[in-house]
Image (cartoon, rainbow, N blue to C red):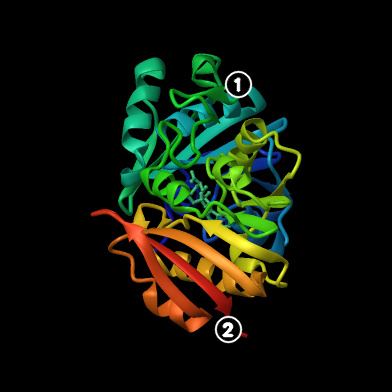
Amino acid sequence: MAQSRLSTAIEDGLLPLPDGTIALMRPSAIYDVSPLPRDAVQIVHSFYPDVAAWQGAGFPTTQALTKVSVAIIVVPRSKALARAMVAEACLHADFIVVDGQKTDGVDSLFKSCRKELGNLPSITKGHGRIFWFAATDVFASWAIPEPAKGPHGYFTTAGVFSDGAIDAGSALLADALPPKLPTRMANFGAGWGYLAEPILARAGVKSLDLIEAEALSLTCARLNVTDPRATFQWADATALGGASFDGIVMNPPFHTGRATDPSLGRTFIQAAARSLASHGKLWMVANRHLPYEDTLTECFRNVETIGGNGVFKLFHANRPKR
Ligand SMILES: C[S@@+](CC[C@H](N)C(=O)[O-])C[C@H]1O[C@@H](n2cnc3c(N)ncnc32)[C@H](O)[C@@H]1O
């Protein structure tokens, strides 16, 4: 494996890490922690599959940053979330390290930090950059205190899926749902809860489980969905099973970082089949270019296309295979 930016910075003696607890903010499950003193590391993350992976590797995890010596920010795709993480890190840590890929906007964050702080030590390597500075209050205005209502009238926050607008695929799926739905429903990858309202508006629904891996999204969903039939689960939908639902509605994710990854949607389909009772039904939307048909027919006895447009396709499937 190529040496990571963090390893290079520490092992070449360029990055002088102070002693004390090191909070690693939003690291993917494969982030290189080998140059850090293991007992000093705590993981701050809100995406369940990464949290589960770090817990499995024996690291303490938390969703909220508390007082630490060092905060290492692993730059997320969302610019607003990245800036909010800098503000939060400066509030709780003495020393800040920022590490990210160019494609996730690390260079623009570096430029914004340098605008405030002047020249900063930095290393570029492996299509990314790492830089560091002592905590300061000049970034306090980058904080995002609470979820706020977006232009669509729903609560969203930085870093959640489709925070600026209702997703066109989800809107198409909502319109395609039949007037009556099964009793025990679930929405896999529920995001900030857009699909809950159309599901709960259909006749016959007695319960709806909103299952979502990103806790930031689930916080918004709790504000958006106040119907008492709804419950909220911070979980990895792809790890579920147990035939507990009569119907599932989903718009599965298809990105790992910036790259398209159809295997994610396939694992959602497999998990949906495992999680449905034998009479269970699935309604799903996907971008037209994503190859899900084979997985659907492997997992369900009946699969039909129920519409779509130039960008999206809609599926209905029932009778999961066991
Ligand atoms: C395409 S978005 C759809 C969001 C929402 N249903 C909507 O219509 O706005 C997919 C959602 O799946 C969530 N997600 C990604 N991986 C997940 C996993 N393993 N388990 C549960 N949710 C996941 C993402 O955080 C995202 O909110």
Quadrant where the image shows the N terminus? bottom left
Can I make out residue 45 in this image?
A: no
Classify mark 2: helix, strand or loop.
loop
Q: Residue at x 60, y 38 (%)?
A: 216
Quadrant of res 108: top left
User: Could you tell which of marks 2 and 1 lies nearer the N-terminus?
Assistant: 1
Q: In x, y percent, where is residue 153?
A: 50, 24
Classify mark 1: helix, strand or loop.
loop
**Label ID, residue 321:** 2
Q: Residue at x 55, y 57 (%)?
A: 249
Q: Nearer the viewer, mark 2 or mark 1?
A: 2
Q: Which residue is the site of mark 1?
A: 145
Q: In x, y percent, where is residue 127?
A: 30, 51
| Side of 82 where 258 appears, left or right | left
Q: CA distance from mark 2 to mark 1?
A: 46 Å
Can I make out residue 280 in this image?
A: yes
Q: In x, y percent, where is residue 57?
A: 68, 64
Q: How many marks?
A: 2
**Label ID, residue 9:** none
| Side of 10 where 49 appears, left or right | right
Residue 37 higher or lower than 158, as above or below: below
Q: Does the closest atom of ligand 1 sit within 8 Å of the Cβ of label 1?
A: no
Query: Mark 1: which amino acid?
Result: Pro
| Side of 156 where 165 appears, left or right | left
What is the crowding at mark 1: few (fewer than 14 residues within 10 Å), some, or many (at least 20)? few
Q: In the depicted view, which residue is nearer to us: 279 or 191?
A: 279
Quadrant where the image shows the C terminus? bottom right
What is the crowding at mark 2: few (fewer than 14 residues within 10 Å), some, or many (at least 20)? some
Q: In the depicted view, which residue is nearer to us: 259 or 116?
A: 259
Q: In the depicted view, which residue is nearer to us: 65 or 284?
A: 284
Quadrant of res 3: bottom left
